[in-house]
Image (spheres, rainbow, N blue to C red):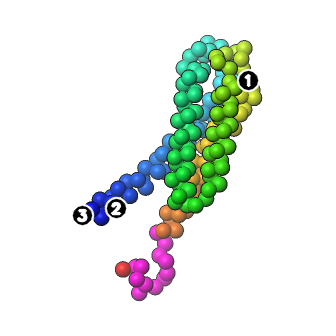
Amino acid sequence: MQAEQVIDAKASNVGQRPLFDRIGMISSSLCAIHCILMPWLLMIAPVLTGTIFTDAKLENVFVAFSILLAGFCGYLGCLKHGKWGVMTLIATGGATLTVVRMTAPAICCLDDISWTHATGAAFGGSLLAASHFLNLKYSRQVDSEEDVPCCPSEKCSAHK
């Protein structure tokens, strides 16, 4: 009875990992798009200044969540597929986003548009999104290899 519960728990965890990677990939991509478009939007529509789209505290929380989610997904994925280069992308993207947020102006408004910050944040967000994409790709490769029989013989003990 306990062995069945362990198998069910493992099966449910396997289904959640791709979901977390997909959420992370989407959120990191949206972060990168936000960082690329916001300076342009502020020039076109300065009314966005002071809204939720330019709130520094919210951006800090979002960046921290993105880095933690990428680290969590990346670590679990690397344990599975063994391609630890994904963690390099996460570390580089996380470090870039952290430096960008630490040096960003307190209020994001038309006078404070910093293209270096926008470019750096878009780069960091893109690295996190790429890490999620690669983690999904490598995890799928491992999953598909596990489904393939170890040999063509049906007399093999692994097929019983």
**Main SS class of the magenta portion in the image:** loop
Between residue 51 and residue 68, name the one nearer to us: 68
Q: Earlier in the sequence, mark 2 or mark 1?
A: 2
Instruction: Choose the circle earlier in sequence order: 3 or 2.
Output: 3
- Whether 45 is drawn above or below 9: the answer is above
Check if residue 20 falls in the magenta segment: no
Mark 1 vs 3, N-terminal side: 3
- Estimate the spatial distance between the alpha carbons at disc 3 and disc 2, rounded to whole Å: 10 Å
Q: Position of residue 69 (x, y in %)?
A: 52, 42
Q: Amino acid at mark 2?
A: Ile
Provide residue 39's location: percent of width, then percent of height: 69, 23
Q: Which residue is mark 3?
A: 1
Q: Helix or strand or loop: what does disc 2 sit on?
A: helix
Residue 53: give x, y in percent of width and height: 57, 22
Name the amino acid type tagged 3.
Answer: Met
Instruction: Check if residue 156 falls in the magenta segment.
Output: yes
Callout in the foreground (1, 3): 3
**C-alpha gap between disc 1 and disc 3:** 60 Å
Q: Residues within 10 Å of mark 2 (few under 14, many from 20)?
A: few
* Quadrant location of the N terminus in the rendered image: bottom left
Badge 2 is on which residue? 7
Q: Amino acid at mark 1?
A: Ser
For the residues labelled 3 and 2, say whether their Cβ atoms are less than 8 Å apart.
no
**Residue hosting label 1:** 114
| Residue drawn at x 68%, y 24% as measured from the top left | 104
Q: The magenta stretch spans which residues?
A: 147-159
